[in-house]
Image (cartoon, helix red, strand yellow):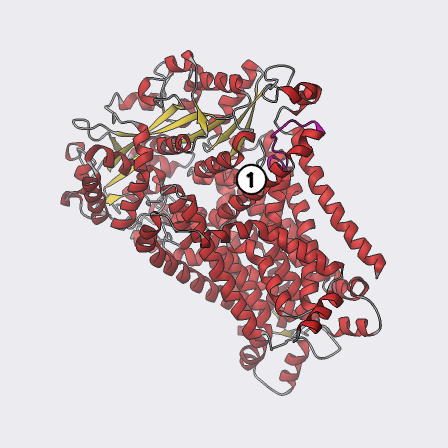
Amino acid sequence: MKKYTVGIMLMVMMTLVFMTGCGSNAENNGTAVKGNTAPNTANDEKKPEDTTEGSGKDKVVNVFTARHYDVDSLIYEEFTKQTGIKVNEVKGTAEELVERLKREGESSEADLFVTVDGGVLNYAKQNDVLQPIESATVEQNVPEQWRDKDNNWVGVATRARVIVYAKDRVKPEQLSTYEDLATDKWKGKVLARSSSSLYNQSLLASFVELNGEQKAEEWAKGIVNNFARDPEGGDRDQAKAIAAKVGDVAIMNTYYVGQMLNSKDAEEVKVAENIGVFFPNQDTTGTHLNISGIGLTKHAKNKENAIKLIEFMTGKEGQTILTQGSYEFPVNQAADKPELLKSWGEFKSQQIDYAKLGEHNKKATEILNKVGWK
Amino acid sequence: MNVVSWLRRIQRRSNAWVIISVIGAFVALLPSLYILVGLFQKPNENWQHIQQYMLKDYALQSLWLVLGTGTLTVLIGVTLAWLVAAYEFPLRRFFSWAFVLPLAIPPYIAAYTYGSMLSYTGSVQVFMRNVLGWTPDQKYFDIMSMKGAIFIFTMFLFPYVYLITRSFFEKQSASFIENARLLGKNPFHIFFRIVIPLAQPAIIGGVSLVAFEVLNDFGVTKHFGIQSFTTAIFTTWFGMYDVESAIRLAAWLMSVIIGVFLIERLLRKRKKYNASTNRSSPLSRRRLRGLPAWAAFGFGAVIVSLSFLIPVVQLIVWAKWTYKDVLNAKFAEMLMNTLSVSAIAIAILMLFAIISANVVRTGRSLFTLVLSKLISMGYSVPGAVLSIGVLAVFISFDEQLSGFYAWLGLGKGKLVLSMSIAMLIFAYVIRFLAVGYNAVEAGFEKTGNRYTEASRLLGFGMTRTFFKVDLPLIKGALLTGCILTFMEIVKELPLTLLLRPFNFDTLATKAYQYASDEQIHQASVPSLFIIAVGMISVFFYHWLGEKNSK
């Protein structure tokens, strides 16, 4: 029996060794600055802060990102090509990544936090995982409207959340504001996706800010009353439901229209061709925009490289790659926009402090639960 | 039992086996304990709102999902297992492994696939409009509903019940069934009065995996707009930014699940279904002829089409449109990542599963009973929440070890373990231990204790008995466990998303990226790779099974 017992113990120990072995391996291949730290051990004793950024061949910047588009990788590749700085990514859900940054604290290897939605950017700021981005170039690239007031994050792209309508059944003159969609006029005709969508939460949060809690709740209730069907599917599914005559108008992001028009599926193109894009609230508060943004993490170890990447992403070249690939609106007006975006023309957008969206997100979620927006 | 004899029992049993399983269980438990602590903290101001607007409705919706899916998976899974095990009919051999294939398709991919396929621009309606010139009412195609979700879960999770029950039927039940046949009982009587009661442990094992999967799902429910308990957890976290309450909700979910299974186990405790004959000859299959044969064939064909062929063909069509954009050098790396991480995790996981299942069965006591349930805990919470637990544990490990890292020259305050693949592997192990464990346990239930007892009586120790007697007997169950966990890990999402190191993509994360951004056409390519990997392992499993049975 002894022999076997020893055997099992050995197996378990080997497993453990294997696990830790993998650990250090990943560390080697991975990201960080290990190659540099080794020769610097002596210095480390005195100056643990001394990172060897920029020296040697390990020029890196580590990104935690909740944006999953292939176009982002294209931008990173272009950046690496031009600067020699390697971009490492961990992709995840924004809220989870914030939680990870929070728990990792000072030790975190992440330099940048990239995500969609201003609310989450502000959530990251509130959780104290970001620091100010100090760069004149970035300030030049990105208008003040798209920057956090303490420069904890800057916008890289925006998406307008608009009303789309059935070209054959609805005339654009019938449309005016988001608020109008909640009136009896549209009973049984409105389509939207579920309340677990961040886009809807942010839209409602913007109403809490602009019109107050009471009005926002009335609006949400009105929309729920006007639903053509229970919320389901994503933004594209709302457009399809218009084509299928389930409803006449839908709340959706513009860039999905762009993607559908360029889809490989001929039927999707047909659907997109038959819906019209309407930018609401032009005479009042303006069209709601979600923002994609980028924040510098509080304990960024490769700060200089990180700022270089932000500068590149918000610069003309980065912005052109971005908008051409994803049909989002660039924050830098120098960018070369796709024809489709140009064809929609200029429009008035909500002038709103994005920090407020984050603050109201919880309220918005509560309202959505309360009025039974599934 | 008095204290002295109890202590003596502990002393008698405290060999390496017990020690390893206790340590394993404890480590596996750390993240779960971390989550459970949430129950004992004072609720914050959001809790009122959550209770009022979410808790009851969302829990009820989850209950319907689990009941609906559970009932249907048992009906379909057990019937198919019985058909394959007890009868000969056209294409039986093909069906016997084809019924496992749906497991290779992640339910959320299936949901997106069926959703798109049946949508206005999907192939079904396009065919009707463009070829038949008929625009049908949308309500007939509304798969994004509770019924639709139950359909998706049933079609893509029934193999759990099928697999575990079938391997049980093939060996265990032969003598009972042949006796019943000799006594002239009709097939229905045999099925309902003998087969089902006999297979109860296997069915419960399989259906509990199904229930866990359904309860933890966020992909299908989110896409279909269903408010399940997991939706509540994520709304609390992602909408109200309240991690604390989200963990609290997860802790509730976890305790309810553990409670249900403890009760089930206590109720079943007195019954033992081990074979009492010493011959474990396989069931001899009867040949079906005429209508019954075609009915069996037809049923199998419908199930295979719905749960595998149709979605896969659709994915292939989409992949033809997009593969050029998606397949690149990184793709091969992704495939390697997926395979190597799974292999390592499975090796560790099965080892612990075998050790603890062996301890549990040889010493039946409250202690081992609790141990066995604790091991399954990782499977009972949503992956994203479990990942916070794992993260917390690893970061605190790293803090403990920071002196050691500095001594190694890695620099101060470095995260070594928690920035490495070790964290992800650890998470896989504790999350899927239940899957491996259930399979091994079902294997032990099937072989019974008589050989083990004989071996012990003849003076072999527990370890020697294990290697000489037990292990060869449960080889099939081990393979089942490996295949099941492999497919789970390949499909796994929330843990991989959050706990992976930099630049570490798997097929599942890539598929999810596209699907979540409504690029289902692009998602088809990585999805097909996941399915292919799953298919290969099913073939391999089947081939080994055939070889062994000869």
Residue B447: percent from left, percent from top: 71, 70
In the visual, does B430 lie left or right of B474?
left
Residue A65: percent from left, percent from top: 48, 31
Residue B513: percent from left, percent from top: 48, 37
**What kind of secondary structure does the magenta stretch mostly adopt?**
loop
How many numbered discs sit on the rendered protein?
A: 1
Residue nearest the observer in this picture, A148 or A223:
A148
The residue stretch that appears in magenta: B408-420
Rendered position, A341 above or below B493 = above
Residue nearest the observer in this picture, A44 or B209:
A44
Residue nearest the observer in this picture, B146 or A138:
A138
Residue beneath disc 1: B499
User: Per the image, is B346 magenta?
Assistant: no
In the visual, does A187 lie left or right of B141?
left
Q: Residue furthest bottom?
A: B183
* Three-letter code, disc 1: Leu
The chain letter for the residue carrying disc 1 is B
Q: The residue tagged with tag 1: helix, strand or loop?
A: helix
Residue nearest the observer in this picture, A77 or B31:
B31
Q: Residue at x 73, y 60 (%)?
A: B17
In the visual, does A244 lie left or right of B333?
left
